[in-house]
Image (spheres, grey):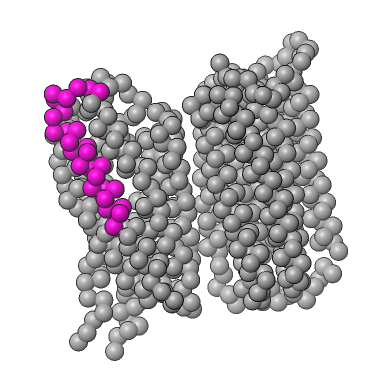
């Protein structure tokens, strides 16, 4: 039963992280935090693929370190890229930030 | 004494030879490492292209003549594939036709670029540029002909039932992967600059690197497979 | 049921089988390609943060989130299919693969709607660098998704006539590919829709 519980718990954890990061952005809490949380989603997913879902750590030995290396590289790319961005601290209280409703505005 | 692999090894040399010819004559002499950006204005393009037209003319003349080697190489691959096929020869035939059509993807664009060099001094900049663009559009956008070859090759060798397959599984998968990755060339017409343009990071540097790598890796394992078949079938 | 007898046999099989890491080679190569894409995007964003923010504002993160959840849910069915396969319950494995396929297909609907909405609003590949990347990356990802749906269908077919270990290896390889499709989306979604902020 533990395997089944594991995958269900994982589903819930991933869904919660996705919704959570989304909500953080929508409320403009902190984009950087969101970005890192989003990377964490991918990390959680990958670690679960490795350990619980696929038992890759012993089944396809060359793959597990490769996937970890990939995650590390992607983490550095995204994390580094975001940290390098000039972040502006909003000085005003954002009003009506949710005006990006459908249909989409045309980019000028 | 009969040798079922007579000529096959010679054909297999077509690949490595064409690879070297392509790098030297199409790439270096032909000024295609990387090609002139689609982002240049017609005048800028002519100013860069016309002074080196003679050099490019030599490059394209040699490349167009050697293009047939791609088909010759493809025949050697097909001969090895036939030893793996069990039910019918569909995959080896598709591979051969894919290689044959890829030859045309060398011949036709090189002919167009050659035409551009022919009257490079007197042609209008816009006309010159459109000829160059035309060559690249065919060269990049006819990727499916090569994808056909790569996927047929990969699928065939993956179905090899030998204890140790003639081509290792990773080589087959690499071939399929390169074939799938070629689809990215479809983005080419939408970008004049950036990574998906004809001289960009992805659509030029990455795609051509993996294509040349494909030719090199397949050639290495092709020779190994021929050696093995010759040994296995020796009387 | 965690220590099912199958697990021990699978370990044995792994030692005896020379291994079929070919699928994983494909997956790794693909993921490497996407890592390059992520790098290109982050460099572009670094050079023009305001432009990227302005473009990002036109993306609808609700659709992106919906697609994330669709893929995660579909991936979960795939996990359970592999679990059933390891227990030798091929019928249940097949049902779960079909469920993964069915729920996964919803991704095509959402993505199709999103593309349609963008294009009808006049936003295309050439609208901005951001949207060039958006369409290119999600398009290539979508291609992988379509291939994945095809592979899932083939797997469901193979599970009607299971051939023991061979079928299990196939099922696991399919699952690994399908996990890659949603793993890539899990990076694409925050990178394109969320991180970096909107204007």
Name which quarter of the figure residue B111 lies in: top left
| Count of numbered badges drawn on the protein | 0
Residue positioned 35% across, 66% down in the render: B93
Start-end of magenta stretch: B100-126
**Which quadrant: the C terminus of chain B?**
bottom left
Report whether B107 appears left or right of A99.
Answer: left
Type of secondary structure dominating the magenta stretch: helix
Residue positioned 73% across, 71% down in the render: C90
**Which quadrant: the N terminus of chain B?**
bottom left
State the image coordinates of residue B154 (x, y, percent, origin top left): 44, 63
Q: Is B189 or C4 nearer to us in this picture?
A: B189
State the image coordinates of residue C161 (x, y, percent, origin top left): 65, 74
State the image coordinates of residue B146 (x, y, percent, origin top left): 37, 53
Residue positioned 73% across, 14% down in the render: A90
Residue positioned 70% across, 60% down in the render: C97
Name which quarter of the figure residue B188 lies in: top left
Residue B141 visible in this rendered orientation of the protein: yes
Reply yes or no: does residue B119 show up in magenta. yes
Q: Residue furthest top?
A: A92
Report whether C147 appears left or right of B68.
Answer: right
State the image coordinates of residue B132 (x, y, percent, origin top left): 26, 33
């Amino acid at each position: 039963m533990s395997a089944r519980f594991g995958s269900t718990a994982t589903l819930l954890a991933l869904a919660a992280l996705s919704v959570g990061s989304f909500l953080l952005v929508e409320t403009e809490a902190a984009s950087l935090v969101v970005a890192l949380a989003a990377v964490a989603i991918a990390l959680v997913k990958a670690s679960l693929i490795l350990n619980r879902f696929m038992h890759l750590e012993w089944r396809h030995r060359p793959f597990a370190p490769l996937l970890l290396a990939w995650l590390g590289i992607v983490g550095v790319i995204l994390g580094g890229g975001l940290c390098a961005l000039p972040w502006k601290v909003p000085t005003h209280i954002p009003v009506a930030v949710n005006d990006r409703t459908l249909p989409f505005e045309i980019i000028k | 004494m009969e040798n079922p692999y007579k000529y096959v090894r010679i054909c297999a040399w077509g690949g490595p030879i064409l690879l070297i010819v392509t790098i030297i004559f199409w790439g270096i002499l032909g000024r295609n490492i990387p090609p002139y950006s689609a982002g240049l204005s017609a005048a800028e393009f002519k100013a860069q292209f016309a002074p080196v037209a003679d050099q490019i003319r030599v490059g394209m003349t040699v490349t167009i003549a050697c293009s047939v080697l791609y088909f010759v190489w493809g025949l050697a691959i097909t001969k090895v594939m036939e030893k793996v096929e069990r039910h019918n020869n569909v995959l080896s035939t598709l591979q051969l036709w894919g290689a044959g059509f890829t030859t045309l993807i060398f011949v036709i664009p090189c002919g167009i670029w050659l035409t551009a060099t022919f009257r490079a001094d007197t042609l209008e900049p816009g006309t010159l540029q459109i000829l160059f663009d035309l060559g690249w559009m065919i060269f990049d956008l006819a990727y499916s002909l090569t994808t056909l070859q790569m996927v047929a090759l990969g699928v065939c060798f993956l179905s090899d039932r030998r204890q140790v397959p003639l081509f290792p599984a990773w080589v087959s998968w690499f071939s399929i992967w390169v074939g799938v990755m070629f689809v990215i060339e479809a983005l080419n017409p939408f970008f004049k600059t950036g990574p998906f343009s004809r001289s960009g990071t992805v659509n030029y540097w990455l795609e051509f690197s993996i294509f040349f790598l494909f030719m090199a890796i397949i050639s290495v394992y092709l020779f190994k497979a021929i050696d093995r078949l010759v040994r296995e079938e020796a009387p | 049921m965690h220590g099912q007898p199958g697990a021990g046999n699978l370990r044995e099989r792994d030692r005896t089988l020379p291994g079929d890491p070919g699928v994983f080679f494909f997956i790794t190569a693909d993921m490497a390609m996407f890592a390059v894409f992520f790098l290109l995007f982050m460099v572009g964003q670094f050079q023009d943060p305001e432009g990227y923010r302005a473009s990002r504002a036109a993306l609808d993160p609700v659709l992106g989130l919906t697609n994330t959840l669709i893929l995660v849910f579909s991936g979960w069915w795939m996990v359970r299919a592999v679990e059933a396969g390891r227990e030798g319950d091929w019928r249940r494995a097949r049902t779960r693969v079909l469920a993964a396929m069915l729920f996964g297909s919803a991704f095509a609907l959402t993505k199709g709607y999103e593309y349609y909405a963008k294009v009808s609003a006049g936003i295309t590949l050439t609208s901005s660098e951001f949207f060039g990347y958006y369409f290119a990356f999600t398009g290539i990802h979508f291609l992988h998704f379509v291939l994945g749906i095809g592979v899932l269908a083939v797997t469901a077919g193979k599970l009607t006539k299971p051939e023991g270990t061979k079928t299990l290896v196939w099922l696991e390889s399919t699952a690994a590919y399908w996990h890659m499709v949603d793993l890539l989306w899990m990076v694409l979604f925050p990178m394109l829709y969320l991180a970096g902020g909107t204007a």
